[in-house]
Amino acid sequence: MKSINPHHFRYSRLFTTIKLMAVGPLYLLSEHALSAVTVDGNVGTGQLDVYPGSGALAYIAQNNAALNIHDNAIVQEIQATNGSTLTIKSATVTSTHRFQAAVALSESNATITDASVTSYTSGGLNVAHQPGTTIGSHAQVSRSEITGATYGANVTSHSLLELNDSKVTGSSQQGLRLLGGAAIARNSEITGATTGVVMARESSTAIESPHLTLDGSRVEGLGGPAISVLSPIMAEIDVTNGSSLSGKNGNMLELSGGGSANMRVNNSALDGNIQVGKDSALDLNLDVAFMNGDIVNSGGSANVGLNNGSVLTGRLDNVDKLSVNSDATWVMVDGQQALNALSMNGGNVKFGESGAFYKLDVANLSGTGGTFIMKADFGSLTGDFLNVTGTSTGHHQLLLAATGADPLNERLHMVHTADGVANFSLVGGRVDRGTYSYDLTADNQNHDWYLDPDSKVISPSTNSVLALFNAAPSVLLGEMTNLRTRMGELRFNGGQTAGLWTRAYGNKYEVSNDKTGLGYNQSQRGFTLGADAPLEAGDGQWLIGAMAGHSQSDLDLNLGSKATINSYYVGGYATWLDSESGFYFDGALKFNRLHNESNVAMSDGKKSKGNYTQNAMGASAEFGRHITLDDGYFVEPYGQLAAVITQAQSYTLDNGLEAKGDRSSSVIGELGVTAGNNIQLDSGGVLQPYLKAAVAHEFDQSNKVFVNDNSFNNDLSGSRLKLGAGVAMSVSQNLSMHADLERSVGKNIKQPLGVNVGLRYAF
């Protein structure tokens, strides 16, 4: 890009207006002046009102005069000097003066509303002071258009231009010239044929800094940058509330000829580059703002600050210092970048988008709480790399993209520091790479940091796979239970009557396996509906029935991961009750359709999902004896054998992790005893409180699960102690109810709570 030569910006032309003001008496003797109407504050009322058809083309207000241009009036040019006041409302100014702006102010104030100001030969609006004085002018322009054949508007030192809902256009040169002056643009547009806004010193000896404030406004350079700072001065630039900058050459700001800028961007999104020339200086601060573009320093200095969620996407070429704070982010777009100083205080540096790896060289790293968002490929042992060549301080984190693909079993170098002072860790303490999660480890006295395969633990994705395949048996067994928890006390009506029954239940399980690292909490809730009738064949003591139901089990897999199993089932059962001996038998067979879904929270904050369905079958056989004691007491020892089997199934999570579960089974033997008392109620019903205790043992030790071809044994074998309490009640001859609570403790499975309530109506 060709840099702007400050000598091309000819001060002699810019000073023409000011010089004309200084030679006002000569102007008054010119042909133009002789045809102008002059209102003098020292003559008469010092006020002139101009209406349509007034006849005069040019007006001069001087010596604190008041000039008012009213609705629909048309004039050529206006000059206000020496403390005069100009008001233009709904009027038109069209000038052909070769040297003077259409509206020229010197030590005067103007209010321009709903007006059109156009110069066909010179500038549109000049807001200036007299040479040698510090009394400037103030122009307030609202809902108006200012157009100049050369520049749109010019503001010198000690002067202020306010634009409200207005447009300023420079047809052949700049839209706005700030020569030590200030401009505030609210919901306005500034457009220049070359540069949108040029900011410079008024003269070689002037020290006043130009100041531009954009509030919801747009600046556009049709042939060059949006803003250009040309002379050795510090320009102040505020870009706020959705303002935008656009340059034809791709630059929104150019600093040259020793021109410098303090630029503050708030609540705006900018698209374009910043060029910093020799001996120039940039101090850029983004606050709740976005910038998409490069910052290129060619012989000057550049400091950049990102704050409060701001995002800068672009290349930083020879930037002296970058400060990234309070959740702001710098997104790299170049494969290799170098910074002299990087300060990280709760901010982020993102090593480009996916598809390529980046390297960042930093001479000095400081701050704490920074996050480097990086990429790594274990398969090829390549990744982004942070290299601190000088000093390093603070504690920083790496956030790496998670994946379902497995890596190689070798370390991957991620960070190097020359002094070994700064500390690094992974966000969340891990990164998920396929079957396992890995940690960041230090080597060479904290000079080098690696992703270490020796630190692996099963990943949340793997935990989800193991949990879903493992939970299916407990789902089925929670639905089945034993005779008493399924149907209550059948002996209230002899157990030989047809009936309808329903059961609602809830179970909580805590599952862990130290060998595999599996761990999850399971919450199950469901209901069963059933109907049965006596079997006339045999000894007349059989009851057969059918049942159907649904349960939902929610799995809490830690670290924000979840899984769900929806189970739908139908089944049948046969129950034998011997009224004389008290012996009983109960057998049940059930068929299930399981819908399994996993929602995995990975280490990089993303989600991975997968789902599959499978069939299952369960059966149980229970044998016991009801022994009646004195005073309504009873004991009921029993034994039960329950088995379930689930279909083999394979599925793939959307992060690429492949899972396969072999046909799984569970075989549980249980020995227990129930003791209670039958209390006769005055209403004729019976209240039966009871306590129960049992020992259950899981015999199955081999349920294979494969994750990315890594084999795991879902072994949850072992014994559990079960304790419970309940109550059954005969409400009437036909209606009975029951409820019980249960708790169990085991090596791999704990049941903090099991709740069961039921209702049976006998015909």
Image (cartoon, rainbow, N blue to C red):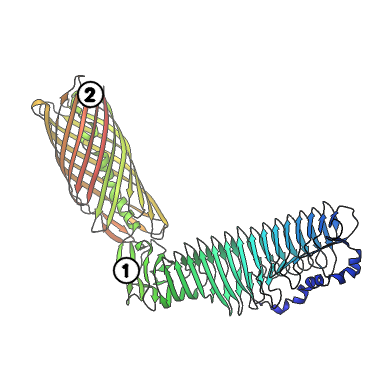
The picture places residue 637, in percent across and down from the top left corner, at: 12, 36
The picture places residue 382, in percent across and down from the top left corner, at: 41, 72
The picture places residue 434, in percent across and down from the top left corner, at: 36, 62
Res 6 → quadrant: bottom right
User: Is residue 16 found left or right of 600 in the rendered image?
Assistant: right
Q: Is residue 629 above or below residue 44?
A: above
Visible in this render: residue 646? Answer: no
User: Is residue 577 found left or right of 516 in the rendered image?
Assistant: left
Q: CA distance from mark 2 to mark 1?
A: 65 Å
Circle 2 or circle 1, nearest the eye: 1
The quadrant in which the N terminus is found is bottom right
Front one among 120 and 215:
215
Looking at the rendered structure, the kind of residue marked 1 is Pro
Res 3 → quadrant: bottom right
| Of pointers 2 and 1, the one earlier in the residue sequence | 1
* Residue at the spot 66% in from the left edge and 59% down from the top edge: 217
Front one among 462 and 276:
276
Res 95 → quadrant: bottom right
* Residue at the spot 29% in from the left edge and 56% down from the top edge: 705
Of helix, strand and loop, which one carries label 1?
Answer: strand
Looking at the rendered structure, the kind of residue marked 2 is Thr
The quadrant in which the C terminus is found is top left
Front one among 197 and 78:
78
Of helix, strand and loop, which one carries label 2?
Answer: loop
Question: What residue does disc 1 label?
Answer: 453
Question: What residue does disc 2 label?
Answer: 497
The picture places residue 17, in percent across and down from the top left corner, at: 79, 70
Local packing at callout 1 (Cα closer than 10 Å; few below 14, some 14-19, many 20+) is many
Count of all numbered marks drawn on residues in the image: 2
